[in-house]
Image (cartoon, rainbow, N blue to C red):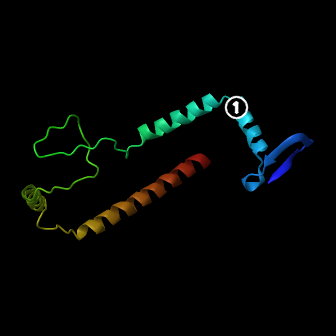
Amino acid sequence: MLLEHESRRGKKKGKFTILGKKGRTLLEREEWIERFRKIDSVKILMGLAVVILLVLLLTPSLEFVRHEWKVDDIAPKNMKAPADFLIEDKGSTLKRVQEAENGVLALYDFDAKLIDHLSKRISSAVVGFSVYTRLQRSARSG
């Protein structure tokens, strides 16, 4: 459908455009392209290329070259496992458990008098502290 192009400043004579999607005219698209060219489009494209390159290089999960390993192959460089592996040495584990069991005392020594002894020491310390504070108060006032 041919229409006369109208801008904010008024009608432009002799320019007919076809309405595009979402109501944008081809002339508006050309104006946008011209604005884009005024900005250094080469710099923008180079910046985007650098960003894409860095993303590809720094993403650890991307694998570009896969090597099929066989038994007795020698790796060209050090490799890290993708997960931890638990390989239990049952003989050594059993030996250490037995050493730990042997290191524990078989008899628990319960001293019933210990509680009385500690409570007497604590009460004597409290009494001694209260006597000390009384002497300090009497020395200041007297």
Residue denoted by label 1: 37
Question: Residue 126 lies in what quarter of the image?
Answer: bottom left
Q: Amino acid at mark 1?
A: Arg
Taking 33 as reference, is 118 left or right? left
Residue beneath the point at 38% across and 43% down: 60
Residue beneath the point at 14% across and 57% down: 88
**Could you say which is closer to the camera, residue 49 or residue 109?**
49
Taking 47 as reference, is 37 left or right? right
Residue beneath the point at 51% across and 53% down: 133
Rendering coords of residue 63 (x, y %): 34, 44
Rendering coords of residue 56 (x, y %): 44, 40
Residue 142 appearing in the image: no
Question: Residue 42 lies in what quarter of the image?
Answer: top right
- Farthest bottom residue? 112
Rendering coords of residue 5 (x, y %): 85, 46
Total labels: the figure holds: 1
Residue 100 appearing in the image: yes
- Farthest right residue? 10
**Could you say which is closer to the camera, residue 12 or residue 33?**
12
**Could you say which is closer to the camera, residue 126 or residue 6?**
6
The quarter in which the N terminus is drawn is bottom right
Residue beneath the point at 72% across and 54% down: 21
Rendering coords of residue 97 (x, y %): 12, 60
Helix, strand or loop for disc 1: helix
Label 1 crowd (10 A; few <14 / some 14-19 / many >=20): few
**Could you say which is closer to the camera, residue 58 or residue 42?**
42
